[in-house]
Image (spheres, rainbow, N blue to C red):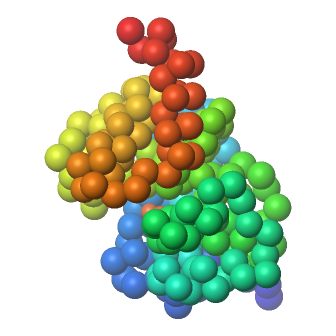
């Protein structure tokens, strides 16, 4: 009997992720399903994207760079390799989702691809995974609980809080801020500012 997609995913994650990262992925998937239900998004897609979003997270920076050798890269790739190679895990994750699980669904692929940096014109499922990744139940950062509750009522406001917190963290730690995240911020602020006020 062929294994269901869920069993294939659990097998893969249990072999490739630490127990802590596995638990995080499970929690992100569970919370993504909750947010999907509230935002009329396909629950199975949210669950699969949540489970798989960090499927490449166990790869070290050099492994990630090697993974992309000979593959088509993307805008900002060189700068990411130079300044923050760990950010490649979301791009590598999308490729693993395609190649390992033969998933072709664009909603799932983009939710995995953009879960760390975001992008302009993010879809609802992309925002769900982006937010769920930061406020899943094991997350303990200062406002995690407040933003988790906020996300249940207003995904866009929670998205704003998560994105702002991520940017503040990078700036406060004196690290390189990826231009794609700046684009995400400017897109969000220019489109949703009026709605939020
Ligand atoms: Fe991640
Ligand atoms: Fe994550």
Q: In percent of the image, x 63 and y 63: which residue is there?
A: 77
Q: Is residue 94 left or right of residue 195?
A: right
Q: Is residue 90 left or right of residue 72?
A: left
Is 92 above or below relative to 195? below
Is 150 above or below relative to 73? above
Q: Quadrant of the C terminus?
A: top left
Any part of residue 136 in sight: no
Residue 193 x %, y %: 46, 15
Q: In percent of the image, x 74 and y 66: which residue is there?
A: 73
Q: Residue furthest left?
A: 142
Name the residue nearer the viewer: 81 or 146. 81
Residue 152 x %, y %: 39, 34
Residue 41 x %, y %: 64, 39
Q: In percent of the image, x 43 and y 76: which residue is there?
A: 22
Q: How many marks?
A: 0
Q: In percent of the image, x 72 and y 49: which residue is there?
A: 107
Residue 91 x %, y %: 63, 65
Name the residue nearer the viewer: 6 or 184. 184
Any part of residue 166 in sight: yes
């Amino acid at each position: 009997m062929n294994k269901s997609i869920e069993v294939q995913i659990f097998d893969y994650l249990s072999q490739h992720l630490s127990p802590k990262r596995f638990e995080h992925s499970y929690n992100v998937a569970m919370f993504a399903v909750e947010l999907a239900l509230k935002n009329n998004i396909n629950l199975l897609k949210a669950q699969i994207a949540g489970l798989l979003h960090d499927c490449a997270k166990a790869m070290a920076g050099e492994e990630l760079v090697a993974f992309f050798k000979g593959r088509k890269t993307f805008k900002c790739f060189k700068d990411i390799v130079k300044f923050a190679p760990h950010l490649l895990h979301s791009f590598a994750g999308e490729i693993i989702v395609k190649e390992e699980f033969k998933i072709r669904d664009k909603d799932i692929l983009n939710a995995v691809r953009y879960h760390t940096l975001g992008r302009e014109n993010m879809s609802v499922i992309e925002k769900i995974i982006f937010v769920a990744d930061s406020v899943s139940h094991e997350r303990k950062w200062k406002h995690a609980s407040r933003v988790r509750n906020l996300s249940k009522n207003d995904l866009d406001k929670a998205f704003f809080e998560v994105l702002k917190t991520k940017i503040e963290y990078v700036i406060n730690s004196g690290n390189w801020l990826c231009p794609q995240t700046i684009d995400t911020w400017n897109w969000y602020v220019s489109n949703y500012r009026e709605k939020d006020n």
